[in-house]
Image (tube, rainbow, N blue to C red):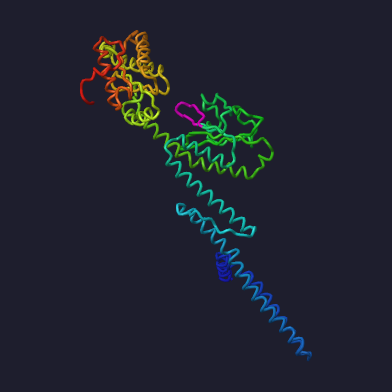
Amino acid sequence: MRKIQESLGKLIELILNRSLFWKVGFIIGLCISVNLASVIYLYYFISKKATSLGFFSEIVIYFENIFYLILIISSVFLIIGAIAFWFLVKKPLTNIVNALNTLIYSPESVSMETLKEYRARDEIGQLVQTVNQLLANFREINVYRHIIENDESVEEVYERVAHILRKLSFSSFVIYEVSNSQNTMKVVCKSDEDLEVNVEKLFNADKCRAKRTGKIVSSLEAPNICRLYEYNGITNHYCIPIVSGNRVSGIVEIHLPMTDLTIRDKKLKEKLNLIKTYLDETAPVIESKRYAEALKEQTFKDPLTNLYNRRFLESIIENLTAQIIRRGTVLGILMCDLDYFKSINDKYGHEVGDLVLKETAQLLADNVRKSDLVVRFGGEEFLILLLDIKEGEGEKIAEKLRKLIELFEFKTPKGIVRRTISIGVSEFPLDSSAIWEAIKFADIALYKAKEAGRNRVVRFKREFWTHEEY
């Protein structure tokens, strides 16, 4: 008995492990076999009775014809059913399985083609449509990931996110970038410049629930969940954190209509889930680009004064001068040097000297335009590039800076320190069409200022340079 049960169990397992085509074929074949067996049994039963009663011929022949007709019809329908099942069920399901296997095990080889359209709108047709949508989404996300990986800056990546939001019909949104070191947030992209944001969370990022928890915060499930949302009672919001390595690097705040239909909208929830998938792909790219930019910033900035260094100047000077020439404007060049700076280190120590350098750098940077460039050129020398000025304006700005330093009191642990500054001025391309030669001319003018007694501004003159070439 036990062997029979084991054999029966193996037979059932064998059937269950077969293809759907063979399972359905087995069930249909079993039904037809039972029906045929019943007809055969009825045929022999009637023929036996008819023979014993003496009226065999007519009834038996009639029943025999019906039997053969049923057999032929059953065979024909069985063949047609098998062919139909193969093309309508077995083949589409096999294609779906192959597509999903490719998506799972070889995602890089997923082609741009979708599954062949299935005309019927039954469960298999719906499954084909769903798989096609899955493949399309995967391809789009895959293309998106490759695009943002090759974007030059984090700002471009945020623009890509904004494009995806608009593509999915989200017309109102704000994208924030989070600084974990300073616990601040800043707006990097808005769908509409008139959209208002709460400034409280900009200065204290932990006030933002999505940033603090690293979880999606939505008023769709919990009305008024965020007291800092500016449009409570007017629109719903759906805030998705951009998370990488357990750190929130950004927040995407989506504004949604405040209707019951919005809460029940299945398509909307699918779009929101899709956005979350895009942001999951975006997060590590943003993190790596921000890290790369931070490293680049460190190599291009002077650690003491936080001004750009000479290496940065060399990396941008060609583009900067090309723009000056294209616009037909003037680049003012100021070479600045603190007078008798070495005496500060000798008298008060290097800590005081560093403090004076830092405050001088801050003074210079704060008193030129944001578009101008202040560079620590070396030691106590600073180079200032004044973009798009008028001829002769550089000398006036230099004089303003000289007076500012002369009157300034440097407050140090060793008491008040006062210093003056000497500045040499040249202008590109008026003094030279070669930018490094123009910088050299400003340096020569600086030395002329030193020779003339320091604490003065000297504009470069051609007679200062007696050499034929730079």
Tell me, yes or no, if residue 412 can be seen here. Answer: no
As drawn, the residue found furthest toward the bottom would be: 54
Q: Give the range drawn in magenta.
A: 177-188
Quadrant location of the N terminus in the rendered image: bottom right
Q: Quadrant of residue 23?
A: bottom right
In this orientation, which residue lies closer to the viewer: 174 or 366? 366
In percent of width and height, residue 293 lies at 40, 33
Query: At 22% from the left edge and 26% from the top edge, which residue is drawn?
Result: 469
In this orientation, which residue lies closer to the viewer: 136 or 29? 136
Q: In this view, does 269 lie above or below 173?
A: below
Q: Is residue 26 above or below residue 223?
A: below
In this orientation, which residue lies closer to the viewer: 363 or 359? 363
Q: In which quarter of the image is residue 420?
A: top left
Residue 180 among those drawn in magenta: yes
Q: In this view, does 275 lie to the left or right of 431?
A: right
In percent of width and height, residue 238 lies at 59, 36
In percent of width and height, residue 216 lies at 56, 36
Residue 343 among those drawn in magenta: no
Q: Is residue 272 left or right of residue 440?
A: right
Tell me, yes or no, if residue 170 can be seen here. Answer: yes
